[in-house]
Image (cartoon, grey):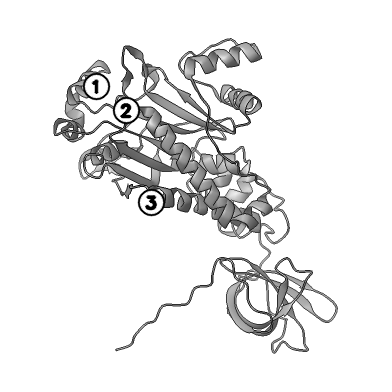
Amino acid sequence: MKTITPLENEPSAWSPRIGETVTLHGMLYKIREMSGFAFLLLQTRAQLFQCVWSPDFSGFPLEGLRPGSAVEVTGLVAAEPRSRAGFELRLLTCQVLNRPVPEEPPVVVNNREIPASLETLLDYRPLTLRHQKERAIFRVQSALCAGFRQYLLENGFTEIHTPKLVSGGAEGGTEVFTFDYFGHPACLAQSPQLYKQMLTGVFERVFEIAPAFRAEKHDTARHINEYTSVDLEMGFVRSFYDIMRTETALIRSALAYVRESCAEELRLLGAEVPEIAAIPSLPFDEAKAKIAARFHRPITDPLDFDPEEEKLLGMLIKEETDSDFVFVTHYRSAKRPFYTMDTPGNPEVTESFDLLFRGMEVTTGGQRIHDWQTQTNKLRARGIDPAAFESYLSAHRYGLPPHGGLGIGLERFTARLLGFDNVRRTTLFPRDTHRLTP
């Protein structure tokens, strides 16, 4: 019987000792031939290494090596103060594991910038993601997820995994992808909303980081049809302000994690990570009036913001409080889903909020209805047959704690953090009204 031992992993930030001989594997990122020697940039999973080839110490020919080749190299670590890392690798051997097809690539990805349109970046995603800046975007996004997950696990949340094939939309409406499921109508999940509410009666605090699907025909810089939602739900809340306080702490912790673990990526992208002490908040109606008064804009939609209003509100709050974030509370009941709790004494508004980050909505949340009769009555008032939500309502029937939660759009949040206007820049493989590949 053969025993397989685990591989030793290269640390995310590796600093070898000067004078030692090391073996690394990675992709050849760039080759710069000089007079009598050459620089080879090796892209490993963790970082970019400057390597030097010379006939004086390299026991292999330079000919035949091409950018895009998968290689394993052995070399001597030598001090080099002109290198960003403070050292370079003097190559002794190189084993080529695979070479790219010998043809001109459609996009050059080993220069400082990629001189290409967004459409080209997306069309050739398997190639363009190898560019240092493109790769850095998703290292930051990965760190964001790790930061979110770390905070939630440390604060009593249980990670869950809910179905994405469901019998009906959690948000109501027609913006769902429908299909035939063995002779029964089904759709892709818009949200884990109903499941995470049910599970507050089991675990009290739950979260999920997973895809969500919206069959919206919006063709804008802020909409895609499949996105990653960071969802949480917590039981025994006293008000929806408890959820806002949790999100404030969650984001503060996650951004600190990103700041610590992605210093090089943030430098490369020129991104500024905001410090958060507290996040200001104001009611929706007050925010609408504030924007109208300051910018002399008539209120044409009393129920929601348009993108320009979100941007203007972000500017106002930044001027007044120096905060990149703002909570907007008490949205109208007509614009919130059937599970949202109405404000006691004022059923026209809800115990809900959005979080805007640098002028764009990145979170929707609020307190949910936990009482069976109240939820059943609201469904009927919306013209929805409660029988269509029988399993969901059974959780209410058997008893749920007062609860609430939120969903964060991961791609939107990453875009605002890194200063991108188009959410596709922070989506690995976007799915929108035009794109189903790669």
Across and down, in percent, residue 11 comes to 54, 69
Q: Nearer the viewer, residue 326 or 130?
A: 326
Q: Is residue 95 visible?
A: no
Dot 3 alpha-carbon crowd within 10 angstroms: few under 14, some 14 to 19, many 20 or more: few
Q: Residue drawn at (68%, 54%), measured in percent from left and top? A: 268
Compared with residue 258, is residue 173 higher up or lower down, i.e. above or below? above
Residue that label 3 marks: 154
Q: As shown in the figure, which amino acid type bears the numbered disc 1?
A: Leu
Q: Residue drawn at (42%, 49%), measured in percent from left and top? A: 151
Residue that label 2 marks: 172
- In which image quadrant can residue 244 be found? top left
Q: Quadrant of the image for the N terminus?
A: bottom left
Dot 2 alpha-carbon crowd within 10 angstroms: few under 14, some 14 to 19, many 20 or more: few
Across and down, in percent, residue 124 comes to 59, 54
Query: Viewer-nearest of labels 2 and 1?
Result: 1
Q: Nearer the viewer, residue 220 or 16?
A: 16
Compared with residue 68, is residue 296 higher up or lower down, i.e. above or below? above
Q: As shown in the figure, which amino acid type bears the numbered disc 2?
A: Gly
Residue that label 1 marks: 379
